[in-house]
Image (cartoon, helix red, strand yellow):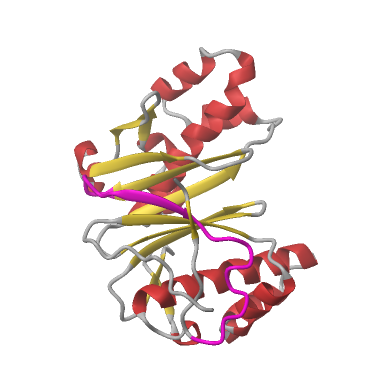
């Protein structure tokens, strides 16, 4: 039996959907069936089969999910790019942002709020200290350098995902400059950003809870949005023969 997704319609709500990029064959087939010619062409450029599968799973699940919000066929959605490359759905009042790392996919969606999301798998980096000096503002670097060595990898990715989420929300990406958006932790909060992107108090900062060795963050323009995390099981697309999709599992 096909059931609709539990999409929140209340103004100001933001939902972060977590899904897997390692899908069972039938679910992956449902993803590939709705890709555009341009997406298929891009998918075919990946040399490794794993990367092709995960790209198809990412774009296909994005199409099915946004189609549920917009009451459209996933095939019919047309995407554009803003000046600095941030994607959007043409002819639709819907905000979304997508991020993936390893097999974890996050899709943040809101009907009203500009947003950005980022997820990263926690892993050792041989050049971590050099990256911290290159990317962290002086206050962040001092904090990071002052913590215990065994905690630095996790804290590095906490700060990194916060920066990425904000830079993606603004639409500038890395062009914004990682040192120009400054964060503090415990609790996570924004300390400063370029004035053309508003005031610190205009932004809502959320560290997301993701199972496994991941760190993830969400930045939303505007205060007071109710942020909800939901999980799509790997087989959520199985059996779909309509433009809608089956139910989900909610994170309590």
Work out whether residue 176 can be spotted. Answer: no
The residue drawn where x is 36% and y is 66% is 7
Task: Give the position of the N terminus as an image quadrant.
Answer: bottom right
Instruction: Report the side of 234 relative to 79 (left or right).
Output: right
Instruction: Report the side of 34 relative to 27 (left or right).
Output: left
Q: Position of residue 234 (x, y in %)?
A: 63, 63
Q: Quadrant of residue 122?
A: top right
- Majority secondary structure of magenta residues: loop
Q: Position of residue 217 (x, y in %)?
A: 44, 42
Q: Position of residue 102 (x, y in %)?
A: 67, 51
The residue drawn where x is 53% and y is 16% is 145
Q: Quadrant of residue 70?
A: bottom left
Q: Out of 7 and 91, give the one closest to the viewer.
A: 7
The residue drawn where x is 40% and y is 46% is 218
The span picked out in magenta is: 221-242
Q: Is residue 159 magenta?
A: no
Q: Position of residue 117 (x, y in %)?
A: 44, 51
Seen from this angle, which residue lies furthest front?
1
Tell me if residue 219 comes above or below residue 8 in the rendering: above
Q: Out of 203 and 24, give the one closest to the viewer.
A: 24
Q: Is residue 231 magenta?
A: yes
């Amino acid at each position: 039996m096909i059931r609709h997704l539990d999409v929140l319609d209340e103004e100001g709500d933001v939902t972060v959907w977590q899904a897997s990029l390692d899908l069972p064959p039938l679910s992956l087939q449902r993803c590939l069936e709705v890709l555009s010619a341009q997406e298929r062409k891009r998918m075919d450029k990946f040399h490794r089969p794993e990367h092709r599968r995960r790209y198809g799973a990412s774009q296909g699940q994005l199409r099915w999910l946004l189609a549920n919000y917009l009451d459209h066929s996933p095939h019919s959605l047309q995407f554009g790019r803003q000046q600095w490359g941030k994607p959007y759905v043409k002819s639709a009042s819907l905000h979304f942002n997508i991020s993936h790392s390893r097999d974890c996919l996050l899709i943040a969606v809101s009907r009203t709020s500009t947003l950005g999301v980022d997820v990263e798998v926690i892993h050792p980096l041989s050049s971590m200290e050099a990256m911290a000096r290159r990317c962290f503002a002086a206050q962040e670097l001092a904090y990071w350098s002052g913590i215990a060595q065994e905690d630095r990898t996790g804290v590095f990715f906490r700060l990194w995902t916060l920066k990425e989420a904000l830079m993606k929300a603004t639409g500038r990406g890395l062009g914004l400059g990682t040192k120009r958006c400054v964060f503090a932790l415990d609790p996570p909060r924004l300390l400063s950003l370029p004035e053309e992107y508003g005031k610190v108090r205009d932004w809502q900062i959320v560290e997301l809870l993701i199972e496994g060795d991941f760190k993830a963050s969400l930045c939303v323009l505007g205060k007071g949005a109710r942020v909800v995390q939901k999980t799509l099981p790997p087989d959520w697309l199985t059996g779909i023969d309509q433009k809608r999709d089956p139910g989900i599992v909610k994170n309590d």
